[in-house]
Image (cartoon, coloured by chain):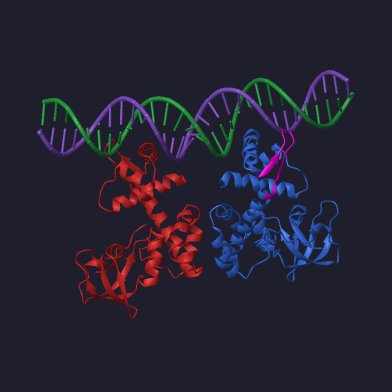
Chain colours: A red, B blue, C purple, D green
DNA sequence: CTCGATTTTTAGTCGAGTCTAAAACCGAGT
DNA sequence: ACTCGGTTTTAGACTCGACTAAAAATCGAG
C-alpha cells in the first residue's frame, strides 16, 4: 500500500506533529535528511493517497488514516526493539537502527507474536510507550531530569533514542528506564548534575541530562 | 551494496544454477515473474558489479562474490524460517513468504543471534540445509519419495517449500522432515502412493509425492 | 545451409524517488 | 505598502527497476 519512503515521511511528520507544530516542508526535509523539493513532491503523493492534508505553503497534517498508519509503524518499531534487546540480547544502543529497517518488513502476525512472547510490553527499551493494537498511544507523564531538585528522588521514564553513542553512555551510567536516581548536586549554569544511581555517584552534563526524562 | 532487486535476481540465478544449467535470460525472467527485457538490463548491472559473468545471448553464471552473496541470503532466509516456526510458532506453510521479505532486512548480528538461540540448526523447517557462516552449503543426499519401493521404509528429508497450499496439506498428512514412512502401495501409472506415516495410512498423489524427498 | 521460429537484446516509456537551480511566494520590518 | 530574506514550489534532470514493441541474434528442421 504505502511504500517504504512514504512510511518514512509519515513517521517524520508524526514526530514533528508530536512536538506541537504543524510541520512544514523544510522541517520534514531536515528530519529525513532530504531536499525540500523532494519533500514537496512526497507531500503531494501522500495527499493523493489521503494520508495527509496538505496546503501549498502551509505544511501538512496527518489524516486519520495517516496517523493510524504511523502509529502502527511505531508499534512495530518499538516491539521489534523490545524483541531485539530482551530476546536477542542485543545492546540497546544498536536496536533503534535495526528496527528502522524491520518496521517496514515485519508483517502483523510476527509483530503480534512478539507482543505475546514478550508479555505485551508497554514501552520500548528506551522507555517510549508502545501504541496498542487498536492504535492508541498510552500517555506517560514525564518531566526533564534537569527539573529534579537537589535531594529529590526520581525514576527514569524514558531516554532519547536516536543517538547511539549517547545511549551507550547512558547504559554505562545505569540511566535506563526504571532506574531510581537522587540528585546530589545541580549546576544551574550549564545544567550539569551529580546523581546517585544504583548506589554509585555519576556525573551528567546538561546535554546528557536533557536526553533523560523521569516520571512526573 | 546490492539492492533488494539485485538480491532477488542473484537468488533466482542461484536456484537455476543449482538445477545444473547455466541460466538464460528467459529462465530467470520466468523464475521472477518479470519480463525478459528487464532481466537483460539487470544482468548488465550485476555484471557491472562483478556479481555474475554475463555473455550476450549466453546466459549468466554467478561469480565467487555473487555466489557468496546468494548463500548469505539463503542462510538468512532459512534461519529466519526456523525462527518463525520454532520460536514464534507460526505455521510452516506461511514462513517462506515472510522470510522472503526478512532476508533483505535482517542484519548479520540478528541472524547470528537466531542461529545461537536455535542451537545452530542445520536445516530450515522444510528440510533444506542452511549454509554455514563461512558460506558452505552442507550436502544432503536425497532421493524422490516416488523412488521408494513398496515395503521399504524411508525418512522424509525435505519438501518443496514454495507452495503454501501444498505445504499445509503435507503438514496435515504428517509428511514433515524427520517423519518415517513405509510404502504400502504404489501406482506406477500416475505415481500415486499409499503410505504408512505416524501410525496412520495416508494417500498421496504423484504430484504430492514429487514434492517430497527422503534421505538416500 | 537456409528459413522460420524462438529467444535475446535494443529502443523507448513510465513511475517512484531523489537531486540542483531557478522561480514564486510569504511575512516582517521599515 | 513595499521590499528583502527566507521558505516553498516548480522545472528539469538523473537513477533504478519495471514495461511493451520492435529489431537482432541464435537455434533447429528440413
Q: Is residue B56 magenta?
A: yes
Tally of numbered discs: 0
Whether residue A122 can be seen here: no
Q: Is residue A2 above or below residue A83?
A: above
Horizontal relation, residue B133 to residue A70: left or right: right
Q: Nearer the viewer, residue B103 or B61?
A: B61
In the rendered image, residue B184, in percent from the top left (x then y), is placed at 82, 65
In the rendered image, residue A216, in percent from the top left (x then y), is placed at 24, 69
Which residues fall within the magenta stretch? B51-64
Q: Residue at x 41, y 66 (%)?
A: A168
Horizontal relation, residue A153 to residue B151: left or right: left
* Residue B28 in which image quadrant: top right
Q: Is residue B9 magenta?
A: no
Q: Is residue A141 above or below residue B31?
A: below
Q: Is residue B103 above or below residue C10?
A: below
Q: Residue at x 37, y 73 (%)?
A: A174
In the rendered image, residue A28, in percent from the top left (x then y), is placed at 34, 45
In the rendered image, residue B167, in percent from the top left (x then y), is placed at 66, 57
Amino acid at each position: 500500500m504505502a511504500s517504504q519512503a512514504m512510511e518514512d515521511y509519515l513517521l517524520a511528520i508524526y514526530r514533528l506533529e508530536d512536538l506541537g507544530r504543524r510541520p512544514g516542508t523544510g522541517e520534514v526535509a531536515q528530519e529525513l535528511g532530504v531536499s525540500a523539493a523532494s519533500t514537496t513532491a512526497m507531500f503531494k503523493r501522500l495527499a493523493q493517497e489521503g494520508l495527509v492534508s496538505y496546503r501549498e505553503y502551509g505544511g501538512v497534517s496527518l489524516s486519520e488514516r495517516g496517523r493510524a498508519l504511523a502509529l502502527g509503524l511505531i508499534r512495530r518499531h518499538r516491539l521489534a526493539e523490545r524483541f531485539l534487546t530482551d530476546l536477542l540480547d542485543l545492546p540497546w544502543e544498536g536496536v533503534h537502527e535495526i528496527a528502522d529497517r524491520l518496521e517496514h518488513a515485519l508483517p502483523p502476525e510476527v509483530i503480534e507474536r512478539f507482543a505475546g512472547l514478550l508479555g505485551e510490553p508497554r514501552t520500548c527499551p528506551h522507555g517510549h510507550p508502545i501504541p496498542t493494537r487498536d492504535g492508541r498511544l498510552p500517555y506517560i507523564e514525564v518531566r526533564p531530569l534537569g527539573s529534579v531538585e537537589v535531594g529529590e528522588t526520581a525514576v527514569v521514564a524514558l531516554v532519547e533514542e536516536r543517538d547511539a553513542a549517547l545511549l551507550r553512555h547512558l547504559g554505562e551510567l545505569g540511566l535506563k528506564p526504571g532506574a531510581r536516581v537522587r540528585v546530589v548536586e545541580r549546576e544551574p549554569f550549564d545544567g550539569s548534575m551529580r546523581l546517585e544511581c544504583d548506589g554509585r555517584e555519576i556525573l551528567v552534563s546538561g546535554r546528557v541530562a536533557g536526553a533523560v526524562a523521569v516520571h512526573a
